[in-house]
Amino acid sequence: MARDKKHSESWIYDQVFAAIIEQRLLPNTKLIEKDLCEVFGVSRTIIRKVLLRLSLDKVVELRPNRGAVIAAPQSEDVRQIFEARRLMEDGIVRKAVHACRPDDIATLRRIASNEHAAVHAGKRSDGIRLSGDFHLRLAEIAGNRPLRELLRQLVAQTSLAIARYVPSGQPMCDEDDHDLLVEAMADGDTELSCRIMREHLEECERRLMMETPPGSSDLHTVFANLVAAE
Amino acid sequence: MARDKKHSESWIYDQVFAAIIEQRLLPNTKLIEKDLCEVFGVSRTIIRKVLLRLSLDKVVELRPNRGAVIAAPQSEDVRQIFEARRLMEDGIVRKAVHACRPDDIATLRRIASNEHAAVHAGKRSDGIRLSGDFHLRLAEIAGNRPLRELLRQLVAQTSLAIARYVPSGQPMCDEDDHDLLVEAMADGDTELSCRIMREHLEECERRLMMETPPGSSDLHTVFANLVAAE
DNA sequence: GCATCATATTTTGTATACAATTAGAAAGGT
DNA sequence: ACCTTTCTAATTGTATACAAAATATGATGC
């Protein structure tokens, strides 16, 4: 597993990041350095680098002297995440419509179809990951690195928000939105594509905000302002 | 200097980041860990954390086994940086126009006026820093953390691009654009504000692209594709 | 039984030691 | 003189040791 020491750091980063995206690591889970060392067979030096990177992605919170936990975005965070996504993904779709080639459309169709399959098979983790992949692929097609990198972070944080607020049975967004978007893009209809994306994100945020935070970790949210003020 | 060990890491980060912004550290400058340790009076552990953070901001390039250098954005990077900035800052201005209060306008006016003073006094470093501060203040007023954070990185990279491509005598953008923007915002004119910002960024990018890269570090740029292909 | 304080254990933060890699300098051959 | 090769010094990468802090445990008094 940890034989290829050369890329072990980025590999471990990817593993933990994927586990967070796929909601196998849930918000507020504590990440003990020693345990991660044992799991991945490296020293704390490496693990700490990984945790620092994850904290800069805002998917892990690094509390000084008190260890790392999986981030638990608050509702105001969620609002800002979706606000940023609406702005960025509008621009991304606009560029992607013009930049996309036939095989890009094919790839998007394939991802969307895999999404349907995952949802049908009840594979929630795969569904969430593929939904994120769809949005990131659009950013890839648009071809702007800074925007893609920020979107990567925002998609990950969206996963955390879903894990935090949406009960596991519930679907988090309309299954067909991605298909509609691909077809609008295939038609070269920029304005329709943008409208679908905007409404897709608005709908997703609305569903997220509908849900009331579950009880166990709610205390952190409720008293966050007090702790911050102290 | 390094007495307050508790915040030393973020303090050192700020110092180096500021030095990069203000172009006291120029692109391709090598950052030797040992030297930084001596300068700031801490161990390599701390310095390496700082370098990792700076590399994730894309203002430092971390070459495996070969040390850290101040990043030298290529023209394609610059194009993408400005593309991202146009998109983001349009949204930021749009929000800021509605969100801004009288004292926000006052702050913006003050920054713009300090900018004029710095340019007049020939204090290039201060001028560059204040110009960045102006844009970041807008993001602050708009009140979206993810957008502000990405803009912070992009503004820093813009500074690097200016250091890399614009001769030190040359002004990098029209002195009055910021003033015009503040007045449009004070009038609550969203569309005019956005147009000024868009044209301001377009003009800045155009001037940057006009300049041909100077000779010394040009080799890195010219043969970058060969090195990448190998 | 419950709260409070003291102690022990765990966990994190920083420095340092050592190994691996690279860059530079000196020597030798053409 | 110039290019190659070899050795040395400098530099980076990782693990580990130790210090500081936080958490958990247990004893004592009420």
Image (tube, coloured by chain):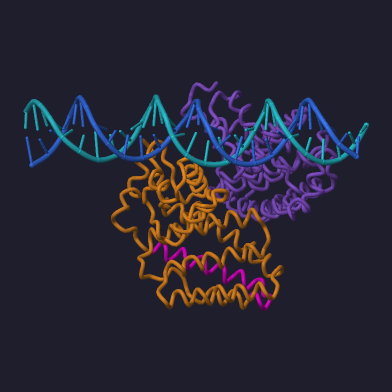
Chain colours: A orange, B purple, C blue, D cyan
- Using the image, determine if residue A95 lies above or below residue B7: below
State which region is magenta. A185-210
At 52% from the left edge and 56% from the top edge, which residue is drawn? A154
Instruction: Say which of D1 and B168 sits in front.
Output: D1
Residue A191: in magenta span? yes
Let me know if residue B60 appears in the view.
Answer: no
Q: How many marks?
A: 0
- Using the image, determine if residue A152 lies above or below residue C16: below
Instruction: Say which of A17 and B205 sits in front.
Output: A17
At 58% from the left edge and 27% from the top edge, which residue is drawn? B37
Report the side of A201 relative to A94 (left or right).
Answer: left
Kindly report the secondary structure that dominates the magenta region of the rendered protein.
Answer: helix
Report the side of B90 relative to A71 (left or right).
Answer: right
Report the side of D4 relative to A137 (left or right).
Answer: right
Residue A108: x percent and y percent? 60, 73
- Which quadrant of the view contains residue B101? top right
Residue A213: x percent and y percent? 34, 58
Instruction: Say which of A197 and A34 sits in front.
Output: A34
Residue D1: x percent and y percent? 93, 31
Instruction: Say which of B162 and A26 sits in front.
Output: A26
Report the side of D27 relative to B188 (left or right).
Answer: left
